[in-house]
Image (cartoon, helix red, strand yellow):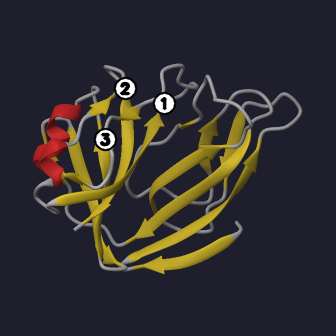
Amino acid sequence: MKGRDIWGAWNVTWGTYVSAGGGTGGNIDTAQGNVNAVFLQEKGSAAITDMSVVDETFPDLDGSAVTIVTIANQAGTWVAIGGQKIEAITIDEITVFGVTVFAGKKWVIGTITDGGDGAVEAVLTRFMNTVEVMKIQPLDSAVLADSPAIDETFPESAAGITLALTASKSYLFLAGGV
């Protein structure tokens, strides 16, 4: 772990990972007892062809051993969000389990299953009018050859968010806005 902060009702920690010696992932210790989301960012000087994934089910995960899967010898950074969560709200393929206010923005975390990006708009409009930032993290047991994409230039109306996701896959999302 490299750092720690409080974002509204959430505990946030971050650090780096390295799968050296031909390794393809492993466990990271987020230094949190309860984790609701983990986001990864690969390090590299060129586009990553196989996206690293988190091989866990959220929320309420023991943060001492979060399993990630990477390509061989991949390095990168991670951000973990834990702490308070709300009663899960599920609409179609979207489940929201975390909402907070930090730095004047509303922040929402949850999961998208079955590549169901169409329901994202219905969910986000319950919490914000405008999305200013969004991150998508694949959840799987193997690296993902087709990386998810957000087809927007932010800020964007919460009612107009378009995502490009792989069918029958699950993703973690973080959205911030007003």
Image location (x, y in percent) of residue 19: 78, 39
Residue at mark 1 to residue at mark 2: CA–CA distance: 7 Å
Given this view, does label 2 or label 3 mark the residue nearer the observer? 3
Marks 2 and 3, how far apart at CA: 21 Å
Up/down of 40 relative to 130, above or below:
above
**Quadrant of the rendering where the N terminus is positioned:** bottom right
The image shows residue 96, relative to residue 128, as above or below, that is above
* Residue pictured at 30% horizontal, 67% vertical: 85
Q: Earlier in the sequence, mark 3 or mark 1?
A: 1
**175 lies left or right of 139:** left
x and y percent of residue 83 in the render? 41, 72
The quadrant holding residue 3 is bottom right
> Looking at the image, which residue sits at the far right?
21
User: Looking at numbered disc 1 in the image, what kind of residue is underneath it?
Assistant: Asp
Front in this rendered view, residue 119 or 57: 119
Q: Which residue is mark 2?
A: 169
Spatial CA span between label 3 and label 1: 25 Å
The residue at which mark 3 appears reads as 152
- The image shows residue 125 at horizontal and vertical percentages of 12, 55
Q: Mark 1 highlights which residue?
A: 140
Q: In the image, which disc is placed on residue 156?
A: none
Image quarter for residue 45?
Answer: top right
